Amino acid sequence: METITLRQQVARAAQFIGAKIAQKPTIAIILGSGLGALADAVSEATILLYTDIPYFPPTSVEGHRGRLLVGQLEGKNVAVLQGRAHGYEGHSLAQITLPIRVMHTLGVETLIVTNAAGGLNSGFQAGDLMLITDQINLPGMVGHNPLYGLNDPTLGPRFPGMNDAYDPALRALAQRVAEGQGLRLRQGVYVMLGGPSFETPAEVAFLRLIGGDAVGMSTASEVVVARHVGLRVLGLSLISNVLSPQPGQASPTHAEVLAATAAAMPRFIALIRGVVRAM
């Protein structure tokens, strides 16, 4: 039986997409839970289902449509990934992050990652937008890192640095755009957990203690791979609810996450469009 290497998987997926699109994207945007409405702003879009793209991981979570749109946004060539796969769906981290490598192969230079996240910072409110300044990749710290295994130096270095994983110049740009729109843009550290269960009060207290401002079940692994291949990264979290370390509080639900993201969608779309326009 033929063994298909990661590099071959990336090449075949990129070849499939490249044959379908008219222009190569330079910016890729990953849309998190309930944030897919931004895809409607992409014009002249070629739309591909993840299930049709070789080796792309399918999505099964509500709020993640599983479509790739390649077209124009604010005069830029973009690739918009409408939804993402997660480890708790049964995918390996190499599968989850394969789309990042494919985007890089297609010519993408900048990645914008977005997610809906629970607020850890007690000063946050549901509906806030948070600029990710750094991350705590808890799955990666205990052995679940997308770079585990033999390293192919043609894909990236064995030991990629993660200082300034979220590009300082892009963060400054996002702040300027938010100020110009009169938008309050929080800043903070994003913590990734494995999920799919939500956090206990004791876990919320722990995550606050180690410096987390928002928590979710994605993103950090994607950013590791993005830096592995040399992409610049901008990260944005939509705070869907604020978590409490006190026992007895009502547990969050995925329906609440989707409702909060829907309410904040106009501000989220305006910010992303403004950032892309200014890049």
Image (cartoon, helix red, strand yellow):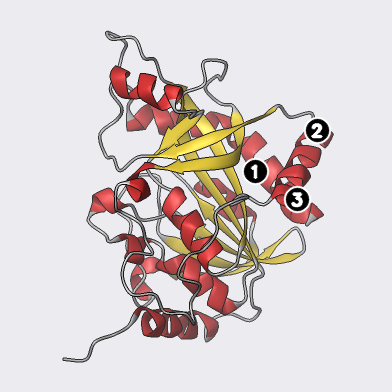
Q: Which residue is mark 1?
A: 269
Q: Which residue is mark 2?
A: 179
Q: Identify the mark nearer the N-term, 3 or 2.
A: 3
Residue assigned mark 3:
169
The mark tally for this picture is 3
Q: Is residue 157 above or below residue 139?
A: below
How far separated are the C-alphas under marks 2 and 1?
Answer: 15 Å
| Quadrant housing the N terminus | bottom left
- Point out residue 35 in the picture as x, y percentages from the top left corner: 51, 44
Can you say which quadrant of the picture contains the C terminus? bottom right
Q: Amino acid at mark 2?
A: Glu
| Mark 3 vs 1, N-terminal side | 3
**x 76%, y 36%: residue:** 178
Quarter of the view holding residue 136: top left
Q: Secondary structure at mark 1?
A: helix
Instruction: Determine whether label 3 and label 2 are within 8 Å by CB.
Output: no
Describe residue 145's horizontal placement relative to residue 179 as left or right.
left
Q: Categorize mark 1 by other alpha carbons within 10 Å: few (<14), some (14-19), many (20+).
A: some
Label 2: how many Cα within 10 Å (few below 14, some 14–19, many 20+): few
In front of the other: 36 or 128: 128
